[in-house]
Amino acid sequence: MRADARRNYERLLTEAKVAFEKDGIHTSLDDIARQAGLGNATLYRHFPTRESLLETLLRDSLKELGSTADALMASQPPGLAVATWVRAAVAHATTYRGLVNLLMDSLKDQASELHNACTSMQSSGAQLLARAQQAGEVRGDITAGHLFTLIASTAWATEHAPEEAPQVLTVVIDGLRPPRESAGARSR
C-alpha cells in the first residue's frame, strides 16, 4: 500500500474507533470519513461495508479473546477459567454499543465478514466449556450455543441496564455451575 493510502487507512480506523466508542456501531460512515478529513469514496475503497470496518477494528481483540481462552486453560481450574472467559467475552461484546447484536448475527451468517472471527472465538469458548464440563465444574446440559446466548444476554443487559449488569453476570456465572442436591434429597 502506498504511504498516502496507508495514512488514509489509519486515519479512517482511528476516527471509526472514536465514533463507534461515542455513538455505537450504527454511526454514519460518511461522518467517519468526514472526521478523518477524507471523502466517503476513500472510506468505501478501504472498507466496502460497515462489517469490513468493524472486522478490521475487532480482529486483534477477537484473536486476543481466543488467546485468553488458551491461557486460561493452562493457568486456571476449569470452572474458574470459564467464568473468567465469560467476563472477558461480555466485556468484548460491549466494546461498542450495538456490537453484541452484530456479533450474534455474524455467528449465524456465513457470508458475514465477522463470521470466521466469531466462530473462532466461539470455538475457544466451547473448548473451555467442554473442559469444565468434563471436570464436573459446569453443568452438562449447557451447549456452546447456550453459553453464547448467555454471554449475549449479559452483554445486552450491560449495554441497556448497566446498573443491573454486575448482578446479571453473577447470576449467569452461578447458573453455569452444576445443580447441588437439595438437603431433602441427601437425607433420604
Image (spheres, rainbow, N blue to C red):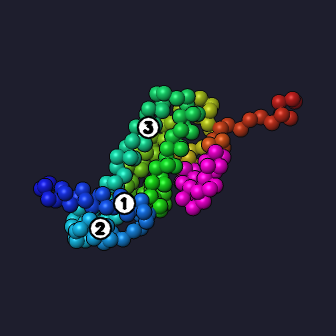
Residue linked to disc 2? 35
Q: Report whether residue 105 is seen.
A: no
Which numbered disc, 1 or 2, marks the residue that appears first in the sequence?
A: 1
Quick check: marks 1 and 2 in contact, CB under 8 Å? yes
Residue range in magenta is 150-172
Q: Which mark is drawn over residue 68?
A: 3
Q: Dominant secondary structure of the magenta stretch? A: helix
Q: Is residue 125 left or right of residue 157?
A: left
Hey, which quadrant is residue 37 in on the image? Answer: bottom left
Residue linked to disc 1? 18
Pick the front one: 119 or 56: 56
Q: Report whether residue 121 is seen.
A: yes
On screen, 117 above or below 5? above
Q: CA distance from mark 3 to mark 2?
A: 34 Å
Expressed as whole percent of the image width and height from the top left, the position of residue 72 reads 48, 32
Q: Residue at x 62, y 43 (%)?
A: 173
Q: Residue at x 46, y 27 (%)?
A: 74
Expressed as whole percent of the image width and height from the top left, the position of residue 159 reads 54, 59
Which numbered disc, 3 or 2, marks the residue that appears first in the sequence?
A: 2
Secondary structure type for disc 3: helix
Expressed as whole percent of the image width and height from the top left, the position of residue 77 reads 55, 28
Q: Nearer the viewer, mark 3 or mark 2?
A: 2
Q: Amino acid at mark 2?
A: Gln
Residue 6 part of the magenta segment? no
Hey, which quadrant is residue 43 in on the image? Answer: bottom left
